[in-house]
Image (spheres, grey):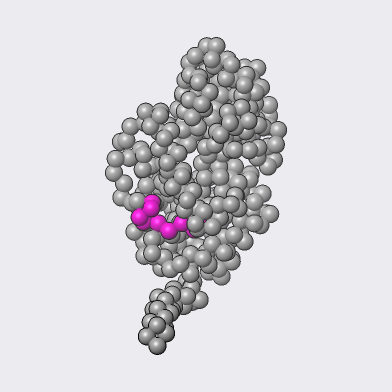
Amino acid sequence: MKGVKGLYLVVLAWFLAVLPSALAAQEWPTRYVRMVVAASAGSAPDVICRLIGDRLGQRLGQQVVIENQNGAGGNLGATVAARAAPDGYSLFCGQAAPLALNQHLFKTLNFNVARDFDPITLIGMSPMVIAVNAKRGIKTLPELIAIAKADPGKLSFATSGTKNVPHLTAELLKSSAGIRMTQVPYSATTQGAMDAMTGVVDMMIDGIPAVQAHVQSGSLIAVAVSAPKRLPGLERVPAISETLPGFNVSGWFGLVAPKGTPPAIIKRINDEMNVVLSEPNLIARLSDLGVYPDTELQSPVAFGTFLQSQAELYGRIAQMAGFEKE
């Protein structure tokens, strides 16, 4: 009898624990949902997050309002989102920098990803591409590596800034291939692409949209992408891993909520996001922006594991490259 009573109490305790979350999810959302974006209005990350927010809002039956919080390499937006109430009415549409890389670049952060956020889903991967000036006569990655080895440090590459995913990609490439090249960082991505096209630098390593028009015009040759396999719509461009097995580093976008958001609400958002990220029209639009959804990373558990693995990967590359925290 005591055993039955004990079991009853356990079941009752579980029921009382999950009931508030379940009821909250049934009632949620009753008003608009805020989506913090750590980028300026009109920027590529802003456009991507607005696309997601618009479709998610349609699925939820409530508007998703974008709040731009640009600054400190994404840290401002992450801090604002981390401090929000965990009630399902604040989300963070974040990039690789604040969610995985910046912990290796800044001595002090006002947030901790593992402590302050609950993972919801990966939105998509954003691979880098190596685009070489067509007049250099380099058409493949093996040719590029051979030339770099023959004349160490002579080949130059543009990146949009430093200590970011394009820079990490270049550093991992140099280490994996055993080559030396000279980085030329640009504050404006468009200027870097223009200088690669005109031959001021030999190539650019950046996201696909940064160089796509110049590749299509023939001014730049896309010799490889940093994704683990060839990309839809770019099947003629090999993956770096075809030459350097195991190579895999990309930017990405993900959706998280403040830590402590009711699990039932996390599940509801994740369910709706899985529908959103399977829509052909949205997939095509994201592809135009250089972002590719990955169904294997669209559960909260899988995305949480991914966040940790990416932080470890970026940390190893940053240490190898000698990046110092600021």
Task: Please name whichever residue, 214 or 260, is drawn nearer the observer in this view of the structure.
Answer: 260
Magenta region: 113-121
Q: Position of residue 54 (x, y in %)?
A: 56, 60
Question: Could you tell whether 126 is left or right of 218 in the image?
Answer: left
Q: Position of residue 291 (x, y in %)?
A: 58, 45
Q: Does residue 262 lie above or below 292 as drawn?
A: below
Residue at the (48%, 68%) spot, across then down: 265
Residue at the extreme bottom = 1
Q: Quadrant of the C terminus?
A: top left
Question: Could you tell whether 262 is left or right of 253 in the image?
Answer: left
Q: Does residue 201 lie above or below 235 as drawn?
A: above
Q: Does residue 273 lie above or below 172 as drawn?
A: below
Task: Please name whichever residue, 278 or 6, is drawn nearer the observer in this view of the structure.
Answer: 6
Q: Position of residue 124 (x, y in %)?
A: 56, 48
Is 117 colored magenta in this rendering? yes
Image label count:
0
Residue at the extreme left = 108
Whether residue 152 is visible here, answered yes or no, is: yes
Quarter residue 57 falls in: bottom right
Task: Please name whichever residue, 4 or 250, is drawn nearer the observer in this view of the structure.
Answer: 4
Residue at the (59%, 20%) spot, across then down: 144
Quarter residue 185 falls in: top left
Residue at the (53%, 23%) spot, across then down: 177
Whether residue 159 is visible here, answered yes or no, is: no
Q: Quadrant of the N terminus?
A: bottom left
Q: Position of residue 11 (x, y in %)?
A: 43, 79
Q: Does residue 221 lie above or below 24 as drawn?
A: above
Is 118 colored magenta in this rendering? yes
Residue at the (38%, 32%) spot, across then down: 319
